[in-house]
Image (cartoon, rainbow, N blue to C red):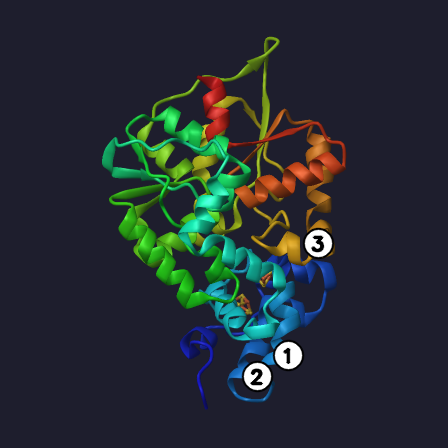
Amino acid sequence: MIEKFTQSKLDRCISCGYCLPACPTYQLTGAEESSPRGRITLMRAVQEGRLPIVDLLPEAGFCLGCRACEPVCPAGVEYGTLLEEMRDMAWQGKNRPLIIRGLFIAVQSKIGMWALGFLSPTAKNRKANPELNLMLGCFERRLFPSVSRTVAKLDTNISVCKEQSCCGALHAHNGELEKGRQMAQKLGEELTGTIITTAGGCAAHLSDVIGRDRVREFSQWWSQNEGKLEKIKKSGRTLRIGLQDSCHLRNGLGVFKEPREILKQLGDYVEVPDAGGCCGAAGSYSLLQRKNSRKVISKKIQDIKELNLDYLVTLNPGCTRQLVSQLRRARVKTKVIHLAELIDLSL
Ligand code: SF4
Ligand code: SF4
């Protein structure tokens, strides 16, 4: 038998089903094969040669990769790693979605990364503390360049190097596991000391490869290093602020208290129902599975509308993009903002 999945990781699942209620795709379909347990059963069948790899394709695409099944699992199944292995074998050659192939090309070369940053007013190159470096991300530098500018402004001790490469999270989550690891190693060599990232997904991937001691997601870093903040007021009224967790940050790294503690200082913090539940962005998911992505976020949009928030804070560029577009579509006035930018508003 050729081992395709890490057998010890498959063996951990005791088929108890505790993960089923936490899984957004199981909630959508109620079908066993669209649950974490069902997908692990499929993986086992492929591992044992009872099913061809091609039979993994529907669930490899349908799973969000949100890892909500991990914190609730009593056996400590590393489902996120199993999903990476699943896509690594299912999304090879012509089975790899075209959009993913295009995204890979955009981020895996120096020229591609340069092109993403071209015309985007990100944080400027700056030599400050060589042991504290800001990661600019790949699509965040293109779509939301103000986030890196704001972090650089908030702490002038942070060094910025615009010639940095991509961390490889996109590759690791989309069927190029080894390449994704190599890219993270390379970025870890380019940026010395502690790397600060404003993207929860990148924080989780980079931490897995180069070690948690080298990586700080922005809310973690701020809560460890910076002082108290003032509440933000508008026309004499304290702002109502909610949060959308980053799945990989919450479920992969266990970081969810830190942003809430900061937000309680900044305004009237309102917990959005199921704030830890996936918003349907899930990396490339909103591009590949547009309809399902919208189904996943629909209840959340309704909840945010009813809460009448001034700001909804995000910790990951994919979530920002998804929430901006879906709130606009539903004509909800709540503004979506990265935590760093909200802190900047208070200062
Ligand atoms: S993944 Fe964990 S929670 Fe889900 S069935 Fe397996 S052991 Fe149970
Ligand atoms: S990663 Fe998310 S969508 Fe996929 S099985 Fe786990 S909970 Fe379900």
**Measured from the top left, where is residue 56 in percent x and y?**
61, 75
* Mark toward the start of the polypeptide (3 vs 2): 2
In depth, the one of 183 and 109 nearer the eye is: 109
**Measured from the top left, where is residue 308 in percent x and y?**
69, 27
Q: Residue at x 56, y 74 (%)?
A: 93
* Mark toward the start of the polypeptide (1 vs 2): 2
**Quadrant hosting ligand 2:** bottom right
Q: Is mark 3 within 8 Å of ligand 2?
A: no
- Judged from this view, the residue extending furthest toward the top is 236
* Mark toward the start of the polypeptide (1 vs 3): 1
Where, by quadrant of the figure, is residue 299 drawn? top right
| Residue 71 visible (yes or no) | no
Q: Residue at x 37, y 29 (%)?
A: 152
Residue marked by disc 2: 45
Q: Secondary structure at mark 3?
A: helix
Name the residue type under label 1: Asp
How many neighbours does mark 2 have within 10 angstroms: few (below 14), some (14-19), or many (20 or more)? some
Q: Which mark is residue 55?
A: 1
Q: Is mark 2 within 8 Å of ligand 1?
A: no
Q: Secondary structure at mark 1?
A: helix
Q: Secondary structure at mark 2?
A: helix
Image position of 260 with respect to 14: above or below: above
Name the residue type under label 3: Arg
How many neighbours does mark 3 have within 10 angstroms: few (below 14), some (14-19), or many (20 or more)? few
Q: Quadrant of the C terminus?
A: top left
**Measured from the top left, where is residue 316 in percent x and y?**
51, 42
Residue marked by disc 3: 290
Q: Residue at x 24, y 44 (%)?
A: 193
